[in-house]
Image (cartoon, helix red, strand yellow):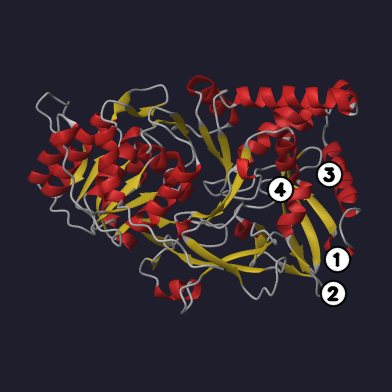
Amino acid sequence: MTAHRTISENFADGIGQSLRHNWDVPCFSDLGGGTLTYGDVARRVIRLHRLFDALELRAGDRVGLVGRNCIHWAVVYLAAVTRGAVIVPILPDFTGSEIEHIVRHSGCKLLFLADAAADAVDSDKMPSVEAAVRLRDFSALWGEDKHTTAAMAALAAPFSASDTPRSAAELKLPMVGGDQLATIVYTSGTTGFSKGVMLTHRALMVNVRFFLDHVSLQPGDNIVSFLPLAHAFGCAFDFLAPYFAGCHVTFVEKIPTPKVLLAAFAELKPVVVMSVPLIIEKIYRNRVKPQLESANVQFMMKLPGLRAFVQKKIRDALYEAFGGNYRELVVGGAALNRDVEQFFRKIGFNLTCGYGMTECGPLISYSAWSENPPIGSVGKVIPYMECRIDGAQKPGDIGEVLVRGENRMLGYYNDDEATAACIDKDGWLHTGDLGRFDADGFLYLTGRSKNMILSASGQNIYPEEIESQLNNMPCVEESLVIERDGKLLALVYPDLESVDRACLKGGQVETRMEANRQELNQKLPGYAQIARLKVLYEEFEKTPTKKIKRRVYDAFAG
């Protein structure tokens, strides 16, 4: 373990530099809607600064932001952090009462709301909010006085030739220190209620700088932004890093189903694709696997001369499905199914996995596909962080992953108890993830420490490893392995497209799943075998990054 690298670049200053250097380059678009150049974005940022001045918004004041990916979401974010305010992005999937709680807890003074959120919340339950603005058109929702309302009306007025800055040279933004709090991100965790993660300008800059140093981006490159911007993964790599590089970012506001995304990729031809495993696994399961299971393909795959031909055809088809122009497909937010990753790597598909958490804004480890990271690893720890495996004596020993460094959070907002439980006296952040290093320094994750099951014989069982195998079996979409009465129970949600293709009806689905259980048990050690399997016909509840909310099923007794 070596000391981590420090960073000297200023995040807010970098935002201004990108505006000036790329003034006439397309910056943001809404899918199927309008486009703003970097100069257009600069003018809107300055207009928002005027609103902040009218509200007497001071450095450190909180600005709440609720909405799906869109141009105005990005503009509000940039305006707030360059003004020294603290942006509080709130996931639009939260209920009205959850939004109200986060606004109260963080003490937001100004609030930007998407239409659905505006209809769901009660202004009387958010006493700290002095003014609220409709995100769609920047019109006033409510305000404390006539002066505030007039300022918001000016914000919503059409732009004219007199709007400043009229050129890159005229753009002046305030300086904001790297140690200053930039954002409070409320987690959407799988095991508990949301906590407010405090990230500095420096933490955000580390994520941007590492991405720019390891992923080739040029001004004008197309990026499709569909991961939730209120989540650290989507915000850092679908929005901030491409913005710093001068890319043209197109926001997908709709819920990102594979059908919606593949149509956007075909139209926009992005150079980099960020994704969560669920989407990649669905594309593999519904587009690739049926071809692999056909008699003709299986026959050709047995012949060395034809196997390479088939793999190239599949690789080319996948490349075109992602727009035919991408250089790297990065998967994060959860573990990718091992068999899916192995297949993509076998055919030469440019895919790589990273690891992070909101508390690091989010990046902890990553290696580009060109570095040929081992299958199953999440790359090497980024140079701005230190990482160790708690209790490990040698490579291969499993323990909790501990990290510290430039992009570690300050702590949880207004929650000293949770902060002390997570960050020890030496500054190590206890991630709650179990992992190991190999002899070459690549990191592997084995599961969450809270999810680990201790068998009756004293063996450690990592349910995520069993789920990864089960999810790759016929007609399985997703699964969850939990302990019941000292035995393992698997909850399975079927892949309905595969069920339809196989013409399974009624009890035939349960029969297929029972066959899966028996087949999988033959591959598992006795202490890790599944005693019972239950088919669920409603999709698992998930976080916005498509991780199953395990705590919802902890008490499952079906």
Circles 4 and 3: CB distance less than 8 Å? Answer: no
Residue 110 pos. (x, y %): 23, 50
**Residue 92 in view:** no
- Amino acid tagged 3: Met
Task: Find residue 457 and name its label.
Answer: 2
- Amino acid tagged 4: Ile
Calculate the distance from the C-alpha at mark 4 to the C-alpha at mark 2.
30 Å
Task: Find residue 375 and name its label.
Answer: 4
**Which mark is in front, 4 or 1?**
4
Residue 151 pos. (x, y %): 12, 40
- Amino acid tagged 1: Tyr
- Amino acid tagged 2: Ser
**Which mark is in front, 4 or 3?**
4
Crowding near the residue tagged with mark 4, few <14, some 14–19, many ≥20 C-alpha atoms within 10 Å? some
Circles 4 and 1: CB distance less than 8 Å? Answer: no
Labels 3 and 2: the sequence-earlier one: 2
